[in-house]
Image (cartoon, grey):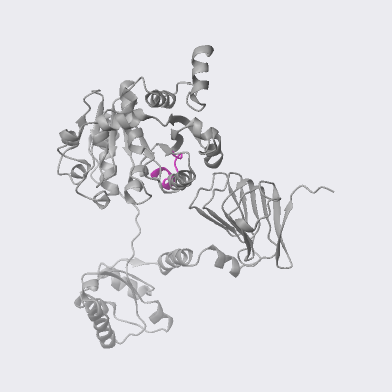
Amino acid sequence: MARIIVVTSGKGGVGKTTTSAAIAMGLAKKGHKTAVIDFDVGLRNLDLIMGCERRVVYDFVNVINQEATLNQALIRDKNCNLLYILPASQTRDKDALSLEGVGRVLDELKKDFKYIVCDSPAGIEKGAHLAMYFADDAFVVTNPEVSSVRDSDRMLGILASKSRRAELSEEPIKEYLLLTRYSPDRVKLGEMLSVDDVQEILSLHLLGVIPESKSVLNASNSGTPVILDEKSDAGQAYADIVARYLGENRPHRFIDDKKGFFRNFFGGK
Amino acid sequence: MSIDSQKKTNMQSALEFKSSTFSVPVLVLSSVDLILIEQQLQEKINLAPEFFRNSPVVLDLQEINKHGYDIDVTALTDIIRKAGLLPIGMRGGNIQQNKQALELLIPVYSIHSGSELAENKKQKKITPAPKQKADSDTSVITTTLITQPIRSGQRIYAEGDLVILAQVSAGSEIMAEGNIHVYNTLRGRAMAGVRGNTEARIFCFDLQAELISIAGNYKVSEDLDETVRNKPVQIYLQEQALIIKDIVQHN
């Protein structure tokens, strides 16, 4: 049974697209056929992060308007042949998406794919609503600062009340917390909310913490999802997250500062 | 039997009966003067000709029959059809009128099924819960129980008491006509006794609220004393003043 994952946050700039690209790649690398859809119509970025911007012919809106078939619009990733990208349209706006259209495309994808990752736009308007409406699981991407936490909380309320599962009174969407741009040093100095602070406010299952890392920007600029940079801490953190999502039990590695991490690394196991 | 079912499975189903609700204009007649009816109907249609063109309509004869008048359904139908409307039903007719309607292939509806249902629905939509309660003040006061977190931006309204087992986030709003119990952290806005019940109270395990109010008397977070913050407290009204007290009484 295919599962639809929405990567959402409410707030912009917290790392939704980076996360979407990384976990989609991670799931595909684990042998699951995965599609990742850019719902940010008008501000498309996913194709850049995935490094396929030069191969975009048709887009999500074309498929919704039935101007192109799904197979024409899906772009196969150059690094992993189980991963496909459905880019957003850059020349349209979010009104080009319709509930029926999105539902139809997702239904078609579900026949062929194991995981469908929906990269939500920021905000709580139409684009974000449609990205989460059909979801089975939600990855709520949050930065350790108050406004991002507040926006995530708002988004969790919307997931619980305005999704298809909520409207049909089905089992609710499974919600996971992803804390990105985390810096243990700054937490220590009291400049940043800690994991515990965030969890106290959101009371949500923590799927993983992504440390603030230069490798994320480098990966974005070079168009390769950061998870492929196996040497980087962010890449490893995303690999852990994918593994945990798939049911593996992996300890959290990036919550404490680096010294602690190395001590664990050399002394522990 | 077995052959039948086999046939069924082999065939693609060509049709299916489904129940569906429509909103159809009802033409309530209060006169039997056909000329007057025709004239006034035309006037109404002239106001919005596009809206009425080929519009389905149900005829309601209840008013007429209440006064014991009789009307020629055939002639009435002619007038309505001439005006560009399409009669798809009739209700409130007597036996004679119903028979006439059926001869004209116009379905007959019972006056109750349609109107009462519609009325009920209307009431639910227009008047929210509080008014119903005002109508029957003696009726059972309900308690609303919530086990899921109340997230930022959500609003909860309870007619009676409100009991919440999960946290109430900052940026949310919980309201009750009766008491509010939050067996977790209260960070949002909590308003008890919103319809003026000064006896209502707020109880919470951990007070971090943005605003608390009982029967319209409120305090914002800034006005809360540090001694009551992050504690299990109860809040009640005494001579127009909000009293915030530890739930656990130390004597």
Q: Pick whichever, A214 or B238, lies toward us.
A: A214
Instruction: Pinpoint residue B84: horizontal percent, then vertical percent.
Output: 20, 74
User: Where the N terminus of chain B falls, by quadrant?
Assistant: top left
Residue A89's image quarter? top left
- Seen in the image, is B20 located left or right of residue B127? left
Q: Is residue A123 visible?
A: yes
- Seen in the image, is A106 located left or right of residue B173? left
For the image, the number of numbered tags is 0
Q: Pick whichever, B82 or B47, lies toward us.
A: B47
Q: Main secondary structure of the magenta part?
A: loop
Boundaries of the magenta span: A164-173
- Seen in the image, is A18 located left or right of residue B136? left
Residue depicted at 22% across the width and 41% down the height: A60
Instruction: Pinpoint residue B134: horizontal percent, then vertical percent.
Output: 60, 69
- Seen in the image, is A199 located left or right of residue B178? left
Asked if the magenta segment contains residue A165, the reply would be yes
Residue depicted at 68% across the width and 58% down the height: B201
Query: Relative to A231, is A131 above or below?
Result: below
Q: Pick whichever, A234 or B147, lies toward us.
A: A234
Residue depicted at 42% across the width and 23% down the height: A240
Asked if the magenta segment contains residue B181, the reply would be no
Instruction: Pinpoint residue B116: horizontal percent, then vertical percent.
Output: 45, 67
Q: Residue furthest right?
A: B251
Q: Is residue B3 visible?
A: no
Instruction: Pinpoint residue B52: horizontal percent, then vertical percent.
Output: 24, 73
Query: Relative to A95, is A259 above or below?
Result: above
